[in-house]
Amino acid sequence: NLREMYGVHTCDQRRTRSYIKATFSEFSIEHGFSENDLLWEADVRETDEHIAGRAKQVLDLVFSEDKETCMLYFFNIL
């Protein structure tokens, strides 16, 4: 759930699962990752409050892990 603001602008819509798998075959795709971007809508822009909530969920997950795993997450993000 770590991604940019979504909605309205087509550049904020994620690629399909098939495209991601074909283009980045060396990476694993998590179970349940949908083929199409279920969050993006052509007529609804995500609010700042929703972005903050998503960011908090990601950070809560990162800091709930052990220190070594936490560093790996940050390394991959950077």
Image: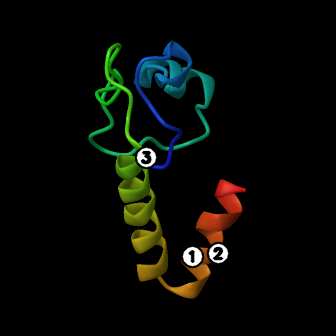
At label 2, counting other C-alpha atoms closer than 10 Å, the crowd grade (few under 14, some 14-19, many 20 or more) is some
Q: Earlier in the sequence, mark 1 or mark 3?
A: 3
Q: Mark 1 highlights which residue?
A: 70
The answer to the question of whether label 1 and label 3 lie on touching residues, with beta carbons closer than 8 A, is no
Q: Mark 2 is on which residue type?
A: Met
Q: Mark 2 highlights which residue?
A: 71
Position in image of residue 6 (x %, y %): 44, 30
- Above or below 56: residue 65: below
- What residue is at 40 percent from the left and 70 percent from the top? 61
Q: Nearer the viewer, residue 13 or 51?
A: 51
- What residue is at 31 percent from the left and 30 percent from the top? 39
What SS does tag 3 mark? Answer: helix
What SS does tag 1 mark? Answer: helix
Q: Mark 1 is on which residue type?
A: Cys
| C-alpha gap between disc 2 and disc 3 | 27 Å
At label 1, counting other C-alpha atoms closer than 10 Å, the crowd grade (few under 14, some 14-19, many 20 or more) is some
Q: Mark 3 is on which residue type?
A: Asp
Q: Furthest residue to the bottom?
A: 67
Position in image of residue 21 (x %, y %): 51, 27
Q: Quadrant of residue 42?
A: top left
- What residue is at 56 percent from the left and 42 percent from the top? 27
Position in image of residue 47 (x %, y %): 38, 40
Position in image of residue 63 (x %, y %): 48, 79
Q: Nearer the viewer, residue 31 or 51?
A: 51
- Depth check, mark 1 against mark 3: the one in front is 3
Q: Quadrant of residue 33?
A: top left
Q: Earlier in the sequence, mark 2 or mark 3?
A: 3
In this rendering, would 28 be left or right of 31? Answer: right
| C-alpha gap between disc 1 and disc 3 | 25 Å
